[in-house]
């Protein structure tokens, strides 16, 4: 569809001129929306991800409310693991919890590869959504190998990722096997979403900022590159994002995505230099929604001004929407980005 292909989001991702800077928010679906909390009543997170009607409704909610330039598929980075039979749950208020953490080669070998037959409900939900969204692009996503490995090795959320890094330092053959396995799963999961009609993909390496530059280069980058290269055979733009990744932003760009997500700690102008030649996404500090509206909008203008130095700029927060965010602030922010950047 020409209208979809010419949407400001896809144009910015490809580094083409836009009529206004496109905007969407990481974690815009779920979390802060009252209409989300209402439809999720009595349904667990993982159950909701496997019901196409519910996934469609939740994915559309922020598009209706804010008029953002892209939808992000409602799911979770651990959903593909659940779908292939890994014993895990998403515990409310905690996050993903894995029953039998992965530590050995035998543990890795016990994890199956993902095929489209594992996730028919994803194919169905994406197809349904693409029909409803019309000219608004749908972003599919997956977790990058390091971030997914962190949940599998730690057994749940962690701050230091100490067990994960201990495996990386102490058992490189197990690490390599695990990273290869997850890279295959993430790539296959993204291919399912693109085949069903997703217009772009985002690879979330949320916790990649936990490793040194040298370790990123040796133990993380090759596997993220594999995922992005695999999806490069489709023609959809790829976004690569991590948190606290200022020191490795150039390497994250080198992994092959068209667009690099910049977290809010890195001034956007600096981020643009580090990923030279690529489009960028970001990077308003997500806590600015709690500041007076004029302060938030003034900071948004600074981000927009900096973004003009990139081939393409997709406005976003520097990480996900904080659950206590007032949706009215995100509506004001969306409208302001559209008006302020119109040309
Ligand atoms: O807009 C959206 O919310 C879309 C859906 C979405 C996405 C893109 C969810 C739903 N999760 C994710 C990705 C995700 N999941 C990431 C990468 C993005 C990021 O950095 O924010 C990560 C790290 C996860 C893992 C995860 N799942 C956590 C973080 C735990 C930690 O380690 O600190 C949590 C709390 C979840 C649960 C989850 N995922 C999504 C929702 C709406 C929820 C909360 C559900 C509940 O509590 O019932």
Image (spheres, rainbow, N blue to C red):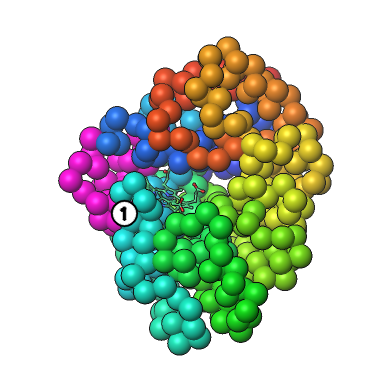
Q: Is residue 307 above or below residue 293?
A: below
State left or right for residue 87 relative to residue 27. Answer: left
x, y (%) of residue 9? 58, 37
Query: Which residue is at a point 30% across and 49% down the rendered structure image?
Result: 92
Residue 54 inside the magenta-drawn segment: yes
Instruction: Look at 34% across and 46% down and name the residue there.
Output: 93
Q: At 42% across and 61% down in the image, what residue appears? A: 156
Q: Which residue is mark 1?
A: 91
Q: Main secondary structure of the magenta part?
A: helix
Image quarter where the C terminus lies is top right
Does the magenta segment cover residue 249? no
Position of residue 130 relative to residue 339, above or below, is below
Question: Which of the two residues, 258 or 145, is positioned nearer the viewer here?
Answer: 145
Q: Nearer the viewer, residue 31 or 142?
A: 31
Q: The magenta stretch spans which residues?
A: 38-62
State the image coordinates of residue 76 (x, y, percent, origin top left): 41, 54
Whether residue 228 is visible to the viewer of this picture, yes or no, is yes
Is the CB–ligand 1 distance for label 1 below 8 Å? Answer: yes
């Amino acid at each position: 569809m020409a209208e979809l292909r010419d949407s400001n989001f896809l144009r910015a991702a490809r580094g083409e001129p836009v009529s206004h800077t496109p905007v969407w928010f990481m974690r815009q679906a779920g979390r802060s929306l009252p209409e989300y909390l209402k439809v999720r009543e009595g349904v667990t997170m993982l159950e909701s991800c496997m019901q196409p009607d519910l996934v469609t409704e939740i994915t559309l909610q922020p598009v209706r409310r804010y008029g953002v330039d892209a939808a992000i598929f409602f799911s979770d980075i651990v959903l593909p693991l659940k779908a292939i039979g890994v014993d895990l749950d998403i515990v409310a208020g905690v996050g993903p919890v894995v029953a039998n953490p992965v530590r050995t080669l035998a543990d890795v070998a016990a994890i199956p590869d993902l095929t489209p037959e594992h996730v028919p409900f994803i194919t169905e939900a994406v197809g349904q959504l693409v029909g409803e969204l019309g000219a608004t692009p749908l972003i599919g996503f997956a977790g990058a190998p390091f971030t997914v490995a962190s949940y599998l090795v730690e057994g749940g959320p962690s701050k230091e990722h100490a067990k994960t890094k201990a495996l990386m330092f102490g058992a490189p053959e197990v690490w390599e096997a695990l990273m290869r396995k997850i890279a295959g799963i993430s790539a296959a999961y993204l291919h399912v979403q693109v085949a069903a009609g997703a217009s772009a993909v985002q690879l979330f390496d949320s916790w990649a900022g936990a490793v040194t530059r040298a370790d990123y280069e040796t133990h993380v980058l090759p596997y993220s590159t594999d995922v992005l290269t695999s999806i490069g055979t489709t023609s959809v733009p790829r976004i690569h994002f991590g948190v606290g990744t200022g020191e490795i932003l150039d390497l994250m760009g080198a992994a092959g995505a068209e667009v690099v997500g910049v977290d809010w700690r890195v001034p956007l102008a600096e981020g643009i230099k580090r990923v030279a030649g690529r489009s960028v996404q970001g990077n308003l500090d997500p806590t600015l929604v709690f500041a007076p509206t004029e302060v938030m909008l003034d900071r948004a203008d600074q981000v927009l001004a900096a973004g003009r130095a990139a081939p393409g700029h997709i406005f976003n927060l520097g990480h996900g929407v904080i659950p206590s965010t007032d949706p009215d602030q995100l509506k004001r922010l969306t409208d302001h980005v559209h008006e302020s950047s119109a040309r």
